[in-house]
Amino acid sequence: MSYLPTKNRDVEQRLRDEAKSLLEQGRVDYVIGFEPGSLKFTTTPLITNNKDDVDHLVINPFIVNNLSVYLTEIKGRVGIIAKGCDSRSIISLIQDKQVVREDIVIMGIPCPGLIDLKKVERLVGKDRDELDNIIRDGDKVVITVDGQGKEYPITEVLYDNCLGCEFPTPQEYDVLLGEPAPLVTDLTASRQKIEMLEGMSQQQRWDFWKDEFSRCIRCYACRNICPACFCERCFVEESEPQWVLPVPRWQDNLIFQVVRNIHVAGRCTDCGECERACPMNIPLRSLARKTYDLVDELFHYKSGTDKEASPLMTAYEQAEAEDFIR
Ligand code: SF4
Ligand code: SF4
Ligand code: SF4
């Protein structure tokens, strides 16, 4: 199956060469990237110390995972593939002293946005298994079904977070594989769900989230996939005191997400992984992006853009509004 424009194939070959040379020269112990997934139009993370495996590395519009989540788990020096948002998560982890910059070789991928298969399925009214091909071509995408290709604007199928992406080109890298990516944004579409929530009364919003979190099965996929959630022991697993019940009651599910969002405030890079990973399709990005925007508005702080800056929640100034801080 081929869903890569030629330009991406060049980037892919450069990446494989770079990764192989890093392992051969002993500059890294592991390489973290993407290999083809077992399902159509998917990729899966590849973590390897075998130079022959790097020939499986791929770059395509389906490299969805934010691979920085693995950095806190791997011991040794690591070469990692990073899109714009992933690079910001790496910077944030450096700021929080969870990883050391010198131990990481960042292979930056300028990112023109990722394709949301659920949007594709809705757009063409077919299951992904029924699609022949999806080819990105600049600001268009060609979707082929039953041998017939049809062209759509790329903005119709990109993830909401990609449509609102501020930094598609990695903010930190050792090698940049490709030209800086142009922004293909649609801020209206990106903020649609958030604005719908902002337009509700408090009661309506409460009822909305009560309904949503009544469906949460507390699988913790949203937490486990999030690079900003790096506590060794999460507050939900504490037994003394027990902050939330382990059973998925909606009230406890809501508390879990409210506290999680506060914990990742100033660390979240709107990578969209929490919402993508949720098996219950709970619109988690609406909370994450709203918090991201509030952090920006109130503190003029964009997560993961300055590795020398203090993490947001550890820096206080005399001029803080709250008395208890002064
Ligand atoms: S948020 Fe930006 S950098 Fe991240 S995947 Fe989307 S377009 Fe790429
Ligand atoms: S991923 Fe979804 S279902 Fe699982 S804990 Fe998070 S919100 Fe609940
Ligand atoms: S909260 Fe969600 S969007 Fe934010 S960094 Fe974590 S996974 Fe990404």
Image: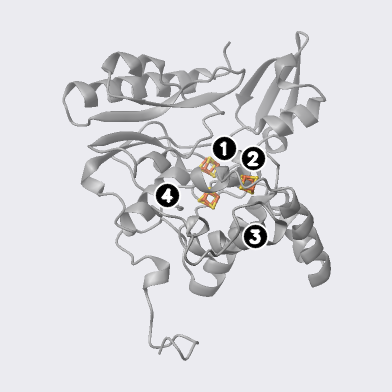
Q: Residue placed farthest to the front in the image?
A: 240
The residue to which callout 3 is attached is 252
User: Would the CB of label 4 be found within 8 Å of ligand 3?
Assistant: yes
Judge depth for marks 1 and 3 and give the one in front: 3
Instruction: Say whether marks 1 and 2 touch (CB < 8 Å).
Output: yes
Secondary structure of the residue carrying tag 1 is: loop
The image shows residue 44 at horizontal and vertical percentages of: 49, 26
Q: Which mark is residue 56?
A: none
Q: Compare marks 1 and 2 and give the one earlier in the sequence.
A: 1
User: Would the CB of label 1 be found within 8 Å of ligand 1?
Assistant: yes
Q: Amino acid at mark 3?
A: Asp
Q: Residue 42 appears in which quarter of the rendering?
A: top right
Q: How many marks?
A: 4
Q: Amino acid at mark 2?
A: Tyr
Q: Nearest the camera: 245 or 125?
A: 245
User: Would the CB of label 2 be found within 8 Å of ligand 1?
Assistant: yes
Q: Residue at x 34, y 41 (%)?
A: 73
The residue to which callout 4 is attached is 89
Q: Nearest the camera: 222 or 242?
A: 242
| Label 2 crowd (10 A; few <14 / some 14-19 / many >=20) | many
Q: Amino acid at mark 1?
A: Gly
The image shows residue 194 at horizontal and vertical percentages of: 71, 58
Q: CA distance from mark 2 to mark 3?
A: 29 Å
Q: Residue placed farthest to the left in the image?
A: 25
The image shows residue 113 at horizontal and vertical percentages of: 57, 37
Q: CA distance from mark 1 to mark 3?
A: 34 Å
The residue to which callout 1 is attached is 113
